[in-house]
Image (cartoon, rainbow, N blue to C red):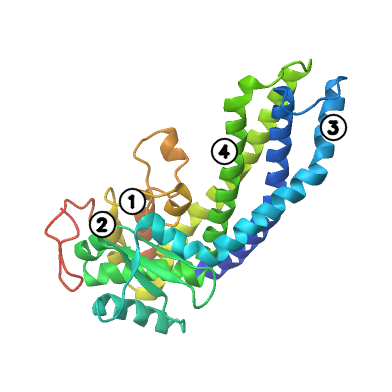
């Protein structure tokens, strides 16, 4: 993806954000309706005693109060998450705020990149782990934050680290970070609804199964719930895949150094694992599954090789090949990028 297309991506990203906000109530309705049909089928909710269509109509009539209730609860959760998302992310990842006096060179790199784009410098955070990764968070100006791992700082040269910081700053510039944080909040809400549905299934053995439409109701309810979950997953995938290609291109645009971004990706490749909820991991610079096949197909991030290929093709960079490792380096040191 060419760097000259960044503005087009920003417009597309804003459109996706609107679709995400508009689509969330639809997903809630689908999942709630499916849950009600399932609970009716298992006898936890009363049926009409008549035909399947009557039972489905009765379940639909309940949406008049279950949907507003769910949306009120979701709004409360969204408000809490809006103001407390950074504290939650820090708790999940173990990130801590660092100051200029403790990480002067790292802070100066981020500050210089922000100044070059007329931005307020994001807060800098560090995770004390040997893994190589980074991510940006925040919802508005003054709240943005860039987090890096200790392993990343130790392994990358100054130019490579600058490229990674530029990558994360591009997420801030393009408002990708805001969209992904909102998507993560929504995913958390849907996960809670999913847990309630499946808990109901686990304890359904004690329900009365005297509804003659039990089988069809359960199957139809499962279909509605699955459609809701799949749509939620598709929305998140739509938001997360292309953003990494564009942020790589944005890093090249900021630093004028495609080789640094490529060599940084090669060092990060296979060394980026950080424990945390899926909603948080989708914010990471790299988040590759441990498995292959279908698991890789549904990964939230494109493979490093594809990102490197794009930078070589459109950014004019050179690929040194997979990194064989080497002695840890301070960010001012020079370490060979390839084995």
Q: Secondary structure beneath disc 2?
A: loop
- Where residue 195 is drawn, which disc sits there? 4
The tag earlier along the polypeptide, 1 or 4, is 4
Q: Mark 4 to mark 2: distance in Å?
A: 31 Å
Q: Secondary structure beneath disc 1?
A: loop
Q: Which residue is mark 3?
A: 58
Q: Is residue 79 left or right of residue 122?
A: right
- Select label 3 or label 2 by which is in front: 3
**Is disc 1 surrounded by few (<14), some (14 to 19) or many (20+) residues within 10 Å?**
some
Q: Residue at (57%, 61%) from the top-left corner?
A: 80
Q: Residue at (25%, 80%) from the top-left corner?
A: 104
**Is disc 3 surrounded by few (<14), some (14 to 19) or many (20+) residues within 10 Å?**
some
Q: Which residue is mark 1?
A: 274
User: Could you say which is closer to the camera, residue 50 or residue 103?
Assistant: 50
| Disc 4 to disc 3: CB gap under 8 Å | no
Q: Mark 1 to mark 2: distance in Å?
A: 8 Å
The tag earlier along the polypeptide, 4 or 3, is 3
The tag earlier along the polypeptide, 1 or 2, is 2
Q: Which residue is mark 2?
A: 129
**Is disc 2 surrounded by few (<14), some (14 to 19) or many (20+) residues within 10 Å?**
some
Q: Is residue 102 left or right of residue 306?
A: left
The tag earlier along the polypeptide, 4 or 2, is 2
Q: Is residue 56 left or right of residue 8?
A: right
- Select label 1 or label 3 by which is in front: 3
Q: Mark 1 to mark 4: distance in Å?
A: 24 Å
User: Could you say which is closer to the camera, residue 54 or residue 23?
Assistant: 54
- Select label 4 or label 2 by which is in front: 4
Where residue 39 sits, quadrant-wise, is: top right
Q: Secondary structure beneath disc 3?
A: helix
Residue 285 x/y as whole percent? 38, 58
Q: Mark 4 to mark 3: distance in Å?
A: 24 Å
């Amino acid at each position: 993806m060419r760097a000259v297309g960044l503005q087009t991506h920003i417009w597309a990203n804003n459109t996706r954000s609107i679709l995400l906000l508009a689509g969330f109530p639809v997903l809630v309705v689908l999942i709630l309706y499916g849950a009600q049909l399932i609970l009716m089928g298992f006898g936890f909710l009363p049926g009409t005693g008549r035909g399947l269509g009557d039972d489905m109509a009765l379940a639909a009539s309940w949406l008049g109060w279950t949907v507003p209730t769910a949306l009120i609860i979701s709004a409360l959760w969204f408000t809490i998450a809006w103001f407390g998302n950074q504290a939650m992310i820090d708790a999940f990842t173990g990130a801590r705020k660092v100051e200029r006096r403790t990480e002067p060179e790292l802070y100066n790199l981020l500050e210089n990149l922000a100044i070059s784009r007329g931005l307020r410098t994001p807060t800098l955070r560090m995770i004390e782990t040997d893994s190589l990764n980074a991510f940006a968070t925040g919802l508005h100006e003054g709240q943005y934050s860039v987090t890096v791992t200790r392993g990343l700082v130790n392994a990358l040269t100054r130019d490579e680290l600058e490229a990674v910081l530029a990558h994360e700053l591009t997420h801030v510039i393009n408002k990708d970070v805001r969209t992904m944080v909102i998507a993560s909040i929504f995913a958390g809400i849907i996960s809670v609804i999913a847990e309630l549905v499946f808990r109901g299934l686990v304890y359904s053995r004690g329900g009365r199964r005297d509804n003659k439409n039990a089988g069809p109701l359960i199957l139809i309810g499962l279909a509605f719930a699955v459609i809701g979950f799949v749509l939620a997953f598709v929305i998140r995938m739509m938001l997360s895949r292309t953003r990494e290609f564009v942020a790589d291109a944005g890093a090249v645009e900021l630093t004028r150094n495609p080789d640094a971004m490529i060599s940084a990706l090669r060092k990060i490749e296979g060394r980026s694992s950080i424990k945390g909820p899926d909603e948080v991991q989708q914010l990471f610079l790299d988040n590759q599954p441990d498995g292959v096949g279908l698991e890789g197909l549904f990964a939230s991030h494109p493979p490093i090789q594809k990102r490197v290929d794009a930078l070589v093709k459109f950014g004019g960079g050179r690929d040194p090949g997979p990194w064989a490792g080497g002695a840890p380096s301070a960010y001012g040191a020079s370490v060979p990028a390839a084995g």
